[in-house]
Image: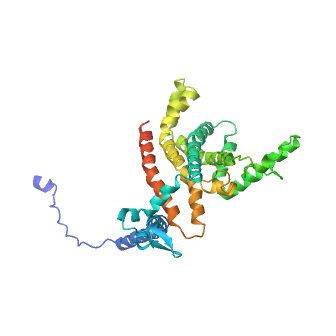
Amino acid sequence: MTEALAPVIEAPKKEKPRSIKRQKGSGSKAASHWRVYLFIILMLLYPVAQFCIMWFGVNINSILLTFKVYERFQLVWVFDSAANNGNFFETLFYNYGELFKTFGQTDIQDMFASSVVYFGLACFVTLPIALVFSYFVFKKIRGAAFFKVIFFLPSILPLFILCQAYSLSFNAEGGILPGIFQGLGIDTGNFFASLFIGNRFGQSSSWMVWIFCIWSGIGYDVILLTAAMSRIPRDILESVKMDGVGSFKEFFRIIIPLVWPTITTLFVFGMMAIFSTTFQPLFLTPGNKGTETIGLHIYNQSQSGSGALQTPATLGLFCSIVVAPIIMGVRSLMNRCYKNVGF
């Protein structure tokens, strides 16, 4: 009876081994992956090709030009030219020797001095002004949206249009500022007529280019600095405010250390203004009265049509070799000022 009432425990049935079949849709997934890879390759093909041609190819060609000379209406290697005097190193670096001989010329010295000024303007004038304005915009003062447009506008418009608008504002005939002085009954004489060309007494017009570079450079710095400040967690600023820290201490003790990597990057960009300031003096003054820079000098020599491209190429490579270690050293020193904080 007990045996009859006891539940019948059936032994588990052995399942038949299933045959390993290819999962449905695996082929379509693999095909979709290949489509993704193909899309990525096609999207990267153009920028990679542009980098290889426009940067790598151009720079390699510029380096090779420093070992050529212009003879018989063509560029030939220095060893195949009249510059070959039998000495290997003197012949190989013939263009550099010719470059060093020009360093004693007054116009070349003025060119270097004029270029260094733009480094000082970008790093010690434009950057601090942009940092202060960025803090005001970040704190959302009254009219912050209006100031954003004012600062961002020079960074959006092409450089040529900015130069034309700037020069026309000071035009002696129909310019905004001369019109204001004329409306006030103030006789300015030939002041506005000689702003961009200097005058017969040797007055330089470079300070007008300096003002333009400061005005046009502030907007770019403000864009990057405000973006860096917007990444600062609000919890930090609220806790600082609860501790009674004022705006002055907040700016110097909190904001600047936290956005220091961006400041370092902009400072390095400002150092490169020694070479990148090219078209500003070209559009505004055409290099008159001591406004020629290294970049403008290289551009003018490249466009002279003489075919002697080895001279500007040698100057550009020499400046790069000399300044590159200085820039890297300054960047390394600035990175040691504050620790990089991730947030």
Q: Quadrant of residue 5?
A: bottom left
Vertical comparison of 109 with 27: above or below? above
Q: Residue furthest top?
A: 244
Colour scheme shown: rainbow
- Measuring from the top left, give residue 277's x and y in whole percent: 59, 53
Q: Quadrant of the C terminus?
A: top left
Circle count: 0
Vertical comparison of 80 with 171: above or below? below
Q: Residue at x 56, y 42 (%)?
A: 120
Res 183 seen here: yes
Q: Nearer the viewer, residue 155 or 25?
A: 155
Vertical comparison of 119 with 41: above or below? above
Q: Residue at x 72, y 56 (%)?
A: 164
- Measuring from the top left, give residue 40's x and y in whole percent: 44, 67
Q: Residue at x 67, y 51 (%)?
A: 289
> Would you say 169 lies left or right of 127 here?
right
Q: Nearer the viewer, residue 115 or 265?
A: 115
